[in-house]
Image: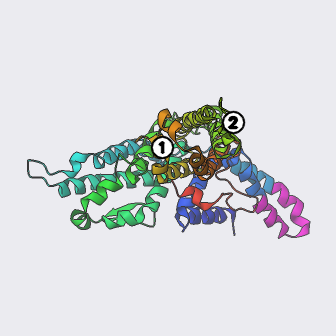
Amino acid sequence: MSFTNFWNFNSSNSLYGSNSSTNLYSLFSQRASIKNGTYKRLLKSYFGTADQSSSGSTSTKSNRGSNNIIDTLLREKMYPTVSKDTQEANSNLTSGLSSLQSSVSTLQKDSTFEDTENGQTAADKVVSAMKSYVTNYNNVVTASKSSTLTNKTAYVANMMSATSKNADQLAEIGVTLKQDGTLQLDETKLKSADLSKVQKLFSSDNIQSYGSTISSRAKFAGASSTTSTNTTTNNTSSSTDTSSTTKGTSAAALKTDSEALASSELYAKVKDTNGSETYNIDKILSTAKSFVSNYNKMFDAAESSSNSGVISNLSYIREKTKNNTNALEQFGFSVDKNGRMKLDEDTFKKADMSKVQEFFKDYGSYVASNASRVNYYMNTNANAASGYTSRASYNIPNASDYNASI
């Protein structure tokens, strides 16, 4: 099998195969894999295998030829000439993201789901808004497949993952996910659907809704690139995120606070002025306040990341917090619509510390584990979320890491 066929086979199967939502990040990070050396190891592995199959008398010549081919391929991949078609795709992707965000915004407005005085029904307005959304979404997906703006296409990959995750709910309202990643709208089915399902799916009040996820990714993708569509290279570094030290520090600090709140040492009783044993409330409160502060700092710094590992683990923390809303409120913790946490100190001080300890054994440990991963993905110099191994396979952690989004 020729190298060209080998590459096309792996790329096409990864992009359009059954694990497309998982592998899109890998495909959109080829430049990073070149920079950190994994792509070169792939080439050496392939040509090394090819050389071994040749006769001994020609192996030395083949090796020299292989090295020349590898160097050529690396140069072509690292510094591709941007064709007119690619420039057009880059331009379409940039403009398409703005249009997509606008169409999502329309579907998030309450007025879209209300009849108007001029006789236009809510159903008609929703169908019109959804037609615009599907068109703009498809334009973005199509443009991203030919675009060299990897700092934008990474966000598109996350949008596609979110769409795949919500495929069943979308199908219920007449929006079908096609094999190539684009959407198809059945206007008749949508018009007769329960519009409350559409509104819930695109809710702006729920930061984890499908609509909020798409809006967030479109926003970050539109604001993240400083690369001209006419340049030959993408100047955005894929190995680490901007200000990764700050982001990593807050995630690491949150891990420390979470582990402390889950530990037994923090809840060790001390004697009060009367000689009775009691909890050191001030110490526990101080740790809880630090936990809230670092929780918010981590999300403020990291949620605009295009790194799939960061995005996934932030999502897991957010979901865990949402599932424990009632328990957290009993102890004075609350979360606003933007996902930021607050602590009512008076409520916390009155809480049963034994129950706080028991709660954080699970919740705190879970947050610590995922915050540790956020810290890792933010600070590692290797592209931990994707890349090629020497055996020409993708170096990807658990597949579930790529199926969740903010």
Instruction: Report the magenta residues as a range.
Output: 45-65
- Going by the numbered disc 2, the residue's amino acid type is Val
| Residue ID for mark 2 | 270
305 shown above or below 39: above
Number of marks:
2
Looking at the image, which residue sits at the far top? 273
Label located before the other in sequence (2 or 1): 1
Nearest to viewer (mark 2 / mark 1)? 2
Residue 148 position within the rendered picture, expressed as x and y whole percent measured from the top left: 54, 46
- Quarter of the picture containing the N terminus is bottom right
Q: Secondary structure at mark 1?
A: helix
Q: Nearer the viewer, residue 28 or 292?
A: 292
Q: Nearer the viewer, residue 231 or 276?
A: 276
Q: Is residue 51 magenta?
A: yes
Q: How is the image coloured?
A: rainbow
Please give the label number shown on residue 75: none
Residue 229, visible in the rendered structure: no
Residue at 79% x, 66% y is 50
Q: CA distance from mark 2 to mark 1?
A: 68 Å
Residue at 45% x, 67% y is 179
- Going by the numbered disc 1, the residue's amino acid type is Gln
Residue at 12% x, 52% y is 120
| Residue ID for mark 1 | 87
Q: Secondary structure at mark 2?
A: strand
Determine which quarter of the picture holds residue 279. top right
Looking at the image, which residue sits at the far front? 274
Residue 44 position within the rendered picture, expressed as x and y whole percent measured from the top left: 78, 57
Local packing at callout 2 (Cα closer than 10 Å; few below 14, some 14-19, many 20+) is few
258 shown above or below 186: above
